[in-house]
Image: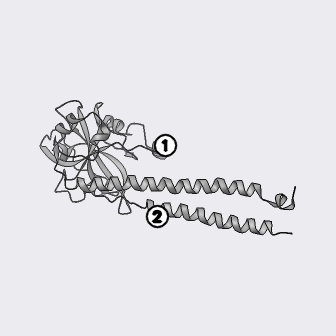
């Protein structure tokens, strides 16, 4: 075996090839994510100008939950302004906020109710509007149908599963667990989608800010792709320098 063959760093080469493949794969994945995100942003831009359709019509149009996502609807919810709420942890403009989730009873099939995200309030606002079960005044809401986001391991771990500690108390949810939130609000047959309100259920309550669909969606995937590809190139330069030094050794 020649001296050059003995000096050739096979372990370093194999490690570099594996690391290079991983970095390039991550860059390509980010390009796919970029294409997906641009589609989402285009859909949201079109949504802003789409006319709202009656919720009953939308629910009857398809049994595919994914097909109903991001559709603008209008619905009437008796007593929504003074309905019980559950709180959902969220962020807005870099601050922690709570989103108020209430139940809207439906008088049409296939679901008995649908959850309505009424909007966000500052974290320090712990008292919701006065709850009055006798109030059945109709509240017309315009909003966007959203499907349940897929929770990750952390949200599953920290989302409470036990009942509230005392009557009238609410828990703080970490994800849109629609079946569990619906059950906590008194419905076992809530729709597997929810409505993010664009109009306020309580116009006289300035601390409530509706509008989930208006929150910005970051799109940094091209930057991430360049970062991964750049790291792959840096890795090659480092490998080439180390290989040259090793082979030039006497």
Instruction: State the CA–CA distance, disc 2 to disc 1.
Output: 31 Å
Q: Residues within 10 Å of mark 1 (few under 14, many from 20)?
A: few
Identify which residue, 92 or 73, lies in the foreground.
73
Q: Nearer the viewer, mark 2 or mark 1?
A: 2
Q: Which residue is mark 2?
A: 223
Locate the N terminus and report the quarter of the image it occupies. bottom right
Identify which residue, 247 or 199, lies in the foreground.
247
Identify which residue, 215 or 59, lies in the foreground.
59
Quick check: 238 left or right of 175?
right
Within the image, what quadrant is residue 111 found in? top left
> x%, y% of residue 229?
54, 62
Quick check: 220 left or right of 17?
left
> x%, y% of residue 118?
25, 49
Quick check: 195 left or right of 138?
right
Sequence-wise, the earlier of marks 2 and 1 is 1
Identify which residue, 218 or 212, lies in the foreground.
218
Secondary structure under badge 1? helix
Quick check: 20 left or right of 129?
right
Image point 44% across, 62% down: which residue? 222
Which residue is situated farthest in the front direction here?
A: 2
Secondary structure under badge 2? helix
Image point 59% across, 53% down: which residue? 22
| Residue 60 visible to an observer of this rendering | yes
Image height of 99 relative to 58, above or below: below
Image point 30% across, 35% down: which residue? 64
> x%, y% of residue 121?
29, 56
Q: Which residue is mark 1?
A: 157
């Amino acid at each position: 075996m020649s001296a050059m063959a003995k000096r050739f760093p096979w372990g370093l080469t194999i490690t570099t090839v594996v690391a290079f493949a991983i970095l390039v794969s991550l860059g390509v994945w980010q390009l796919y994510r970029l294409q997906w995100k641009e589609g989402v942003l285009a859909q949201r831009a079109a949504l802003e100008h789409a006319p709202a359709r009656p919720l009953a019509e939308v629910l009857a149009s398809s049994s595919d939950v994914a097909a109903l996502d991001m559709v603008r609807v209008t619905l009437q919810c008796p007593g929504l302004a003074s309905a019980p709420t559950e709180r959902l942890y969220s962020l807005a403009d870099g601050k922690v906020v709570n989103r108020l989730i209430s139940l809207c009873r439906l008088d049409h099939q296939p679901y008995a109710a649908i959850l309505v995200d009424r909007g966000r309030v500052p974290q320090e606002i712990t008292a919701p509007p006065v709850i009055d079960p006798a109030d059945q005044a109709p509240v017309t809401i315009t909003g966007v149908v959203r499907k349940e986001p897929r929770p990750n391991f952390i949200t599953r771990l920290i989302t409470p599963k036990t009942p509230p500690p005392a009557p009238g108390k609410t828990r703080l949810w970490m994800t849109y667990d629609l079946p569990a939130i619906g059950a906590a609000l008194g419905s076992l047959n809530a729709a597997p989608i929810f409505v993010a309100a664009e109009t306020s259920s309580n116009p006289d309550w300035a601390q409530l800010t509706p509008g989930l669909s208006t929150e910005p969606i970051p799109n940094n995937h091209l930057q991430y792709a360049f970062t991964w590809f750049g790291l792959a190139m840096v890795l090659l330069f480092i490998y080439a320098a180390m290989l040259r030094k090793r082979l030039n050794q006497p």
